[in-house]
Amino acid sequence: MKKSLSTKLVSIILLIFIILISTVSFFNYKNASQDASDVYKGLQQLALSSSFTTINITMNIEAQQHLQAIAKYLQQIDESNVLAQRRVLFNVAEIVQYPSVYITYESTGKTLTEDFDENPTLRISNDWDNKPDLRERDWYVQTKKLNAPIVTPTYESQEGKYKGKTLATATMPYYKNGQFAGVIGIDIFVDSFQERFKNFKRPELPSMEVFIADSSGHIFSREKPLKTNTSGLMPLESALSQALKKKKEDILEFNNYGISQIAYYKQFPFGWTIVVSADKQDYEEATNKNLIFTSLLTLALLAIGTVLLFIIVKSYLNPINNIKQG
């Protein structure tokens, strides 16, 4: 009778404990899942903000400051003074290490270009460039049409010492005496952008990557080569193109060749877009690890509690056995 009563008491108490612990564990799992999601999304947003800032400084703020400085000095020089103009372009190219700095004039179509050289010579040409008329180039046409600075889509250099390098061109309209006089441009290397993003890596999100898409929607900066499909567009490019039609900054979820991913994106003032993506599996693994740890800890404590409870109940029911014998 005593044994039966002890077993019944322990069983009832354990059942109550199991119900309570299960209820608490369920709500704890839900809260932990939401907390992990919030933390990981916060890491992605922080990486997005930092990445956006460093690229915007290079391609927008600094580039426009340098273009404005060039314009300011050129406005003080007569157009026929080729040597003085080249010195201005040369100094900017050497100091900032831009691949090329140039100006094309509206009235004549003539161009002056100075390239960065790691081993510069003191000799600067006193002649105009021997180049075809660049006024029909897209960067010139768009700058003149918009009457505003632009940053072109990226392209691969086809000739010269920078052949094979990926570049983009930042331009601004050049005015002299209040009249549109041409377009000033600078070429900028974009191959090394991923080096800046390595500092944003986090062990909590091993799949997190930073991408940059140019104004045409093409992703040109990425940590690893990405697969392409028959249409030529990657899943992220397709999803990003649709998302940008609605908002310039938001979160999107997409399927990347069978892998569900979460991405935050933000468009630059000059048309490029920065994206920080991560596998949804990273979010789930963090929650699952917490669930497994909590479950194992709960089972261990429940087992220990069962033994202790049985011993305590048994000791308290001993007087009943004495009464029975009496």
Image: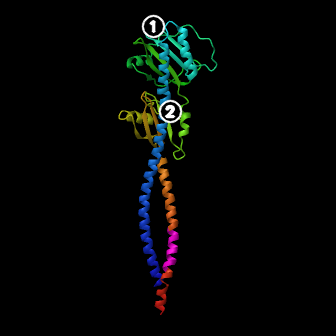
Q: Secondary structure at mark 1?
A: loop
For the N terminus, give its image quadrant: bottom left
Circle on res. 269 = none
Location of residue 112 with respect to 289 vertically, above or below: above
Closer to the camera in the image, 184 or 152: 184
Q: Which residue is mark 2?
A: 54
Extreme residue toward the front, this view:
76
Give the mark nearer the N terminus: 2 vs 1.
Answer: 2
Residue segment shown in magenta? 302-313
Mark 1 residue type: Thr
Whether residue 322 appears in this view of the structure is yes
Residue 50 on image: x %, y %:
49, 37
Total marks placed: 2
**Labelled pair 2, 1 in contact (Cβ < 8 Å):** no
Horizontal side of residue 124 vs 132, given as left or right: right
Mark 2 residue type: Thr
Location of residue 307 with respect to 235 vertically, above or below: below
Whether residue 279 appears in this view of the structure is no
Helix, strand or loop for the magenta stretch, by majority: helix
Residue 45 on image: x %, y %:
45, 41
Q: Which residue is mark 1?
A: 108
Closer to the camera in the image, 184 or 317: 184
